[in-house]
Image (cartoon, rainbow, N blue to C red):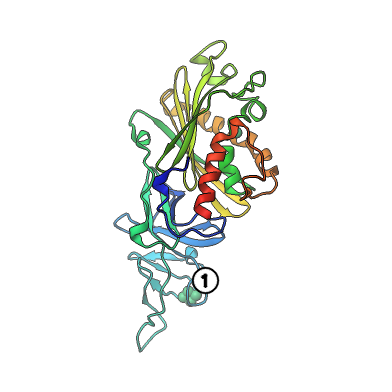
Amino acid sequence: MICHSYLAIAGIKPNYMLKNLWYAVEFSDAVTTHPTLLKIFDRELVLYRTSDGHIQAMANACVHRGAALANGWIDRDCIVCPYHGWHYQPDGSCVKIPSITTGNIPKSARMTTDPVQEKYGWIWLFLGDGSPGEIPSLPNFPQVEASNLRSIQGEFDWNANYERVLENGLDFAHAPFVHAGAFGNPDLPQIADLEIENFAEGASATVHLAATPPQGLWKLLVRGERAPIKTRTGFCLPNITFLEVYLPFGQLTIWTAHVPIDLHTTVSKWINFRTFFTGKWADKDAYNRTIKIFEQDKPIVESQRPQLIPDDLKTELYVPADALQLQYRKLRQYLLS
Ligand code: FES
Ligand SMILES: [Fe+2]
């Protein structure tokens, strides 16, 4: 069933980009008062933070001769082009052209800007052509704000389309094969009783996954065979996946923004929360475990052909374990049609 709160979203075109939605594109702490280059869907933007803490997003190629503003600097909240020193204020209008001695600054000396917000440790960019009234709000992740969680963050690069990467995050049945050396149990590959839940921004599924005994540091917390582990995974459109793992000793949650650099390149920016081992001393172990999982997935996801997921739902096959991916594809197809 398609979630009806999304049916009102406008600006839908037959294109691989889902339009008029907020994309999580960068970590908040990566954007400072120095210009930062952002590549997304083959576009180059520049992000920077003004003195009052707000984030600005602007096209990167200067309207004068196309030099990269990301190589410039900030002067009193204006971004300054490094080629001829034109100053653009946060609304994109040019307020200073150093070479001019007489006359006015042309009205067309203006950079395009994009709506941007900051929430949950990410910068969110609105990509589309909808008017402000049509802009849907950001997803709600109330659990991210819980104060008892220890969080770490990191990035992972893929030579793959972001939707293949995103779907990998919704796939339960690969764990016994791809992650047999981590948590997947190759002796118990069955996926039973997938519970799908639809919500305003996407959908999730919950299963009890067979797991192998814990390794490394986690051995300190539990010994012997593991009972099946309750695992919930899901997506928030357009580019977020999440994973909640209910371990016998606590909860692990990973939120990941899959940033589409271009058709064949993705950067996953993940935030990992845990309720156990909440000291800094365990951060490296948590980081390494997350990266290990991505590295196990990487060669498989990068090998998938076609590189873009098919638009026609009849092109690939679906079994019950694929129900969440199918839900993503149905919703995506609806938004693109
Ligand atoms: S190219 Fe930017 S000021 Fe000339
Ligand atoms: Fe995986």
Mark 1 vs ligand 1: CB below 8 Å: yes
Q: Horizontally, is 305 left or right of 72 in the view?
A: right
Residue placed most toward the observer, 28 or 311: 311
Q: Measured along the vertical axis of the image, is residue 83 above or below residue 16?
A: below
Mark 1 lies on residue? 67
Whether residue 104 is visible to the viewer of this picture, yes or no, is: yes
Give how far across and how far down residue 114 sits, in percent: 41, 62
Q: Residue at x 53, y 54 (%)?
A: 336
In the rendered image, the residue lying farthest to the left is: 52
Rendered residue at 41%/65% (across/down): 113
**Viewer-side residue, 117 vs 156:** 117
Question: Quarter containing ligand 2?
Answer: top right
Whether 72 is drawn above or below 306: the answer is below
- Count all numbered tags in the image, as a single digit: 1
Compared to residue 264, the image places residue 202 above or below, namely above
Residue 264 location, x and y as percent?
63, 52
Viewer-proximal residue among 192 and 17: 192
Quadrant in the picture for residue 15: bottom right
Disc 1 on helix, strand or loop? loop
| Residue located at (50% from left, 69% from top) | 61
Name which quarter of the figure residue 325 lies in.
top right
Position in image of residue 131 (x %, y %): 37, 63
Asked whether the viewer can see residue 292, the reply is: no
- What amino acid type should be assigned to the residue bearing mark 1? Ala
Disc 1 packing (10 Å; few <14; some 14–19; many ≥20): some
Residue 117 pos. (x, y %): 37, 53
Q: What residue lies at 39% left-to-right and 42% top-to-bottom?
A: 200
